[in-house]
Image (cartoon, rainbow, N blue to C red):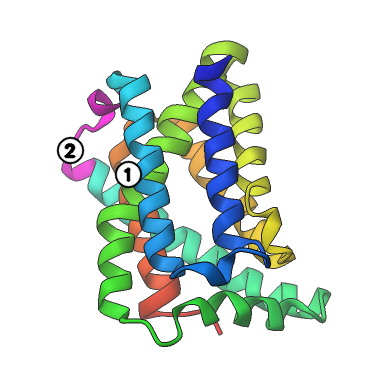
Amino acid sequence: MFRSWGPILVAALLWFLMFSIWTKHLFNFWIGIAISASVLMVVAIILRKEILKQFQWTWKAIGFGLLAATSLYIVFYLGEYFSGLLFGFAREQVDNIYALKEGQSKLWIALGLIFIMGPAEEIFWRGYVQQNFINKYGEWKGFVFATLIYALVHIWSFNFMLVMAALVCGIFWGLMYRYNKNLVPLVISHAVWDVAVFILLPIM
């Protein structure tokens, strides 16, 4: 029970501290998320050491990760257009997400996304959480449970667009993991997409 839900509860607490209106002003968001992701990654590796064996570096895996990042960016580019048509509040909520980088070094944010947040989140959410649920409930239920939890930990932001973005990303990366347990494409996809959407080519 603890191995499955203990780390998830820790993640929920950390995400609450980072995103809730009551606590997010207490510390720098980017430092907070880097530390939080690192803590979760370490916990995941300690509790499931075989995660490290799921890194199989090949040119095919790297190419797949880059292609996946490009595909996900296109999904969000189209999603931004249609969400703007459907929800009058969409633009304001997206702007609130981008406001997190105001006054911060874009270089340091990019480095954090590539070398810390991207890898750490995939190791924890897919390599640990989703795999644990897969072991208990099977591939599809494991995918569904992990994806829903990944989206729901963002709920304290009270930002519908952020929660939906997390849900879309959770579905996308969760399906990648469902069909290919190699974490390399996932890490590359997550890191490259993060940098593209936050720093290089923001969808605004």
**78 left or right, relative to 119:** right
**91 left or right, relative to 35:** right
Does the magenta run of residues contain 59? yes
Image position of 73 with respect to 101: above or below: above
Residue shown at the point (62%, 60%) measured from the top left: 165
Mark 1 — residue?
A: 185
- Across and down, in percent, residue 157 comes to 67, 63
- Across and down, in percent, residue 159 comes to 71, 66
Looking at the image, tell me whether mark 1 or mark 2 is earlier in sequence order.
2
Quadrant assignment for the C terminus: bottom right
Camera-nearest residue between 67 and 87: 87
Q: Quadrant of residue 4?
A: top right
> Label 2 near label 1: C-beta < 8 Å?
no
The kind of residue tagged 2 is Trp
Residue shown at the point (40%, 87%) measured from the top left: 103
Q: Dominant secondary structure of the magenta stretch?
A: helix
Camera-nearest residue between 73 and 9: 9
**35 left or right, relative to 82:** left
Camera-nearest residue between 120 and 38: 38
| Residue 4 seen | yes
Quadrant assignment for the N terminus: top right
Mark 2 — residue?
A: 57
Residue shown at the point (32%, 44%) measured from the top left: 185
Q: State the extent of the magenta-drawn residues as a range.
A: 51-60
Image position of 103 with respect to 144: above or below: below
| Residue 189 seen | no
**141 left or right, relative to 17:** right
What distance separates the C-alpha of mark 1 from that of mark 2?
A: 9 Å
The kind of residue tagged 1 is Pro
SS state under label 1 = helix
Report crowding for label 1: few under 14, some 14 to 19, many 20 or more residues within 10 A (C-alpha): many
